[in-house]
Image: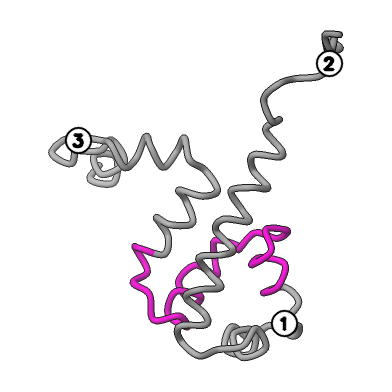
Amino acid sequence: MVAVRKPSESAEPDENEMQRERRRSLGKVLKKWREAEGHTQADLANILGLKYYSFISQVENGIGRIPQSFYGPWADALSIDREEFSWTVLAAIEPRLYDLLAHRDPNKASRANESQEL
């Protein structure tokens, strides 16, 4: 007997599930970096000025997202270059934007830079 799929059922994972999986993958990297520095989740939360370490757990388990304002301090706490940290997070959270930015021609002047000169 052949299984019949309803029109609403898709053979491919939905966008939300793919986002969750990317966050989980990022969480594994962040956990590896944290552990390499010898920090517990509570240590990292304290360094970042967070009241509860559960936020670190949520991020490492792919449930929460790091606010952009925390990228720099989080990278510093893990002794990771801020640019590397930001690119790693961007690749996991916004892969299309990462691809767009990572594959641009560095010799082209950006319009953002041109507009700042005005």
Location of residue 94 in the rendering, given as x and y in whole percent from the top left corner: 52, 43
**Residue denoted by label 1:** 53
Point out the stretch of residues depicted in magenta.
Answer: 56-84
Q: Amino acid at mark 1?
A: Tyr
Using residue 104 as the reference point, say whether residue 42 is left or right of it.
Answer: right
Q: Is residue 81 magenta?
A: yes
Determine whether the residue tagged by mark 2 lies in a helix, strand or loop.
loop
Residue shown at 81% from the left, 19% from the top: 9
Residue shown at 25% from the left, 38% from the top: 110
Kindly indicate the quadrant of the structure image that contains residue 41: bottom right
* Quadrant where the N terminus is found in the figure: top right
Residue shown at 33% from the left, 72% from the top: 81
**Residue denoted by label 2:** 8
Label 1 vs 2, first from the N-terminus: 2
- Characterize the local packing of mark 3: few (<14), some (14-19) or many (20 or more) Cα atoms within 10 angstroms: few
Q: Nearer the viewer, residue 62 or 13?
A: 13
